[in-house]
Structure formats: structure tokens, C-alpha cells
Amino acid sequence: MKIAVLGGGQLAMMLAGAGKPLGDSFTFLDPNPESCAASSGELLVAEYTDLAVLHSLAENSVVATFEFENVAVDAVINLQQQLPVHPPVKALSVCQDRLPEKLLLQQLGIPLAEFMEVNTRADLLEAVANIGYPAVLKTRRLGYDGKGQAALRGAEDMERAWHKLGDYELVLEAFVPFDAECSIIAARDQNGCVVCWPLSRNIHLQGVLAVSMAPWFADELQQQAEDLVNRLLEHFDYVGVITLELFLKDGQLLANEIAPRVHNSGHLSIEGSSCSQFENHIRAISGREVKTPVAKGFSLMLNWLGSIPEHGELVNVDGVYLHNYGKQPRAGRKLGHTTLCAADREGLLQLLDLFRNLEHPSISAAMASLN
């Protein structure tokens, strides 16, 4: 099957890697001529809103999808008039704006931190008076990996944040003093069958995911997370993979964000599960049945931001899997990841200990969290 993907980054590359063994071929649309997915299929270099290119993409594809949620909704609507597009555009639209996203979570009874809309300085003063400190001020759109947000601990932070972000539509959120960050990834096919991966524990550095581990949590938390994500799947009549990012506080899960796509915290499913998030996304959007993923043991992903440490002989160790995205290094850029897989947590810690002498913030974060 010929599949069109809006976006040509590492997620698109990994989607193609999962689809090719199924007999699928891929065409990517991305304005960046150096997109790393170019080696995995045909790359069309153009803006997402280029109608002529969108028409050509649709003519030569059977189904379309997207690898990130900031693609232009108008482009997806245009494609949808020419061929099936999954996940649904209504999910994409809601997830591009934090305010309707939070209102939807609230509507569906999914717990989340207190929030208020902020459009003026007077709105911000009112929101701070109601929510109090600490809080987080965020842009409603185009915020990801810690971008477009500022922590408020007092009046001075509020003034600095307003000076930095006041030109944008905003939301103020109560800060959650969480016990852990986590995410649940689910896939739903066109027959309505839903499967979920184990709830992962996540560690972020400066707002960017650095480490993921799964399985990690008790069965009751897994069930709680699956219930929450299922509400979203049913509401959207969703097809494909979706991710719900969560905070764990005092045994309860609070929603943080929805990602209508495959997710960084699910990379460990490639080697750590009987069916990866990428394969099930391709299965779902192409009309196949999704497969129930079974964890092969315990997995930990180290996200390589800014640089990939030299692995040396570690690449030959059983249970160590390096993925290099082929990108040019840049501070904070996601360049690759390494997944560690073992039969039990003790074996996972032994593998992680082999990385102790490789200097990288992700390794330090994992060591500090697990030891």
C-alpha cells in the first residue's frame, strides 16, 4: 500500500521502517530537503500548504497520516477531500491548541490541573489570583518540548513571563508537584479494536523527554490510564496511535497533554514489545487489524539530545539497540536513542550500569532515578 506522511522526521522514518515489512511504500512531504526520512521513501520538498504538491501526494497514495501535531490543519483537510486521512482531523485540530484540548479533557471527565485562559495582562493577574503560585504560563499553540512556556514562582516571574509571552494567546496552569511523569500509548483500528502498551515512566530534562521505562507501574495504574485514553479514542472515533501524557500524584493520574501520533516515549516498543507503536499505527490507518502488544521484559530508552555518545563495543551487547537518526548535531536536537531490554529490572539496571562512563545528561538522569 502507498502511504503518504506529512512530515519527514525520525517518527516518519520509523513508521516507514515498520511498514516496509508489511509491503507498504512511503512518500513524505516536508519543507526540509535534509529530512531524515528521505532514505526511507520518496521525499517531496514543499510547504505543507502547497495545494499542487498535496494533490500530487494524494494522487499517488492510498491513505495519509502525519508524524507531528503542528502540521497545518488546512493541509490535512485538503488531503482528506482526496483520500482517507488518519488520525482524524478533529483530533489534530484540538491538540494544536491547549485551551480546547483542556476543555475537552474536562468535558470527558479526565482529571487535570486547574487552568485559566489568558489573553491580557488583566487576565493573567486574575488567573494568578485564582490559581496561585507556583504555576506555568504556556502558549496555546506551537508549544512542545518545553518551548513556549514559563514557570511562575512569584510576581517577578509573572512579569518576566508576560514580557516574554504576552503577545500570544495563553493558558495558565497550576503547577503539579508530581511523583512521576508517565504516558499511555494506545492504538485503535478501523473496526474499533483498541490495544495499549504498558504505562511508561518518563524523565524530562528542560522540558524534553530524556528517559522512558516500561513496564513500570502497578496494574491498577495501568487500568486507570487505559480508561482515560479510551475516552479520547471513543470521542474522536479515532484511528491510529494516540498518546496521553500524564502526571502521577498521590496514586492518581492527571492529564498533561494529548499527542495524536506515535510518541517519543514509545520508541522502546520497537525492541521491547511484540508489536511496536509504529507497526500498529500503520496497521490501523491501512485497514489492517491492530495486534495486541506483549512486553518482552523490561525496557529503558535513553534519548540522545544534542549528541550521541560513542557506544564502542556496547553496540554488540545483547539487549542494547542504538538508533541513529542521521541528523546533523545541534544543541537540544533529538539525534537518536538507545533502548536497553532485559528480562527483569535487575538485568535492566545491569545494562544501564554499562553506560555509566559515557557522559550524557540522559544517562545521568536515568542513573539518578533508578539508583
Image (cartoon, helix red, strand yellow):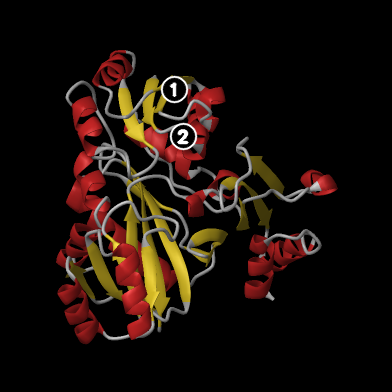
Please state which of residues 137 and 121 is positioned toward the viewer in this rendering: 121
Binning the other alpha carbons within 10 Å of mark 1 as few (below 14), some (14 to 19) or many (20 upward) gives: many
Q: Does residue 160 appear to the left or right of 126 in the view shown? A: right
**Tag 2's secondary structure?**
helix
Residue at 28 percent across and 53 percent down: it is: 141
Q: CA distance from mark 2 to mark 1?
A: 9 Å
Residue at 35 percent across and 65 percent down: it is: 164
2 and 1 marks in contact (CB < 8 Å): yes
Coordinates of residue 21 in the picture (x, y in percent): 53, 25
Residue at 69 percent across and 45 percent down: it is: 321
Q: Which residue is mark 1?
A: 26
Residue 148 visible, this orientation: yes
Please state which of residues 310 and 19 is positioned toward the viewer in this rendering: 310
Q: Inspect the image, locate mark 2, and give the three-letter code of the amino acid beneath it.
A: Ala
Q: Does residue 67 appear to the left or right of 101 in the view shown? A: right
Binning the other alpha carbons within 10 Å of mark 2 as few (below 14), some (14 to 19) or many (20 upward) gives: many
**Tag 1's secondary structure?**
strand
Q: Inspect the image, locate mark 1, and give the three-letter code of the amino acid beneath it.
A: Phe
Coordinates of residue 24 in the picture (x, y in percent): 45, 22
Closer to the N terminus: mark 2 or mark 1? Answer: 2
Residue at 46 percent across and 21 percent down: it is: 43
In the rendered picture of this protein, how many numbered marks are placed on residues?
2
Please state which of residues 10 and 330 is positioned toward the viewer in this rendering: 330
Q: Give the quarter of the image for residue 329.
A: top right
Q: Give the quarter of the image for residue 173.
A: bottom left
Q: Give the quarter of the image for residue 340.
A: bottom right
The label on residue 12 is 2
In which quadrant will I find the N terminus?
A: top left
Coordinates of residue 18 in the picture (x, y in percent): 51, 33
Rendered position, 184 above or below 279 = below
In which quadrant will I find the C terminus?
A: bottom right
Coordinates of residue 258 in the picture (x, y in percent): 32, 56
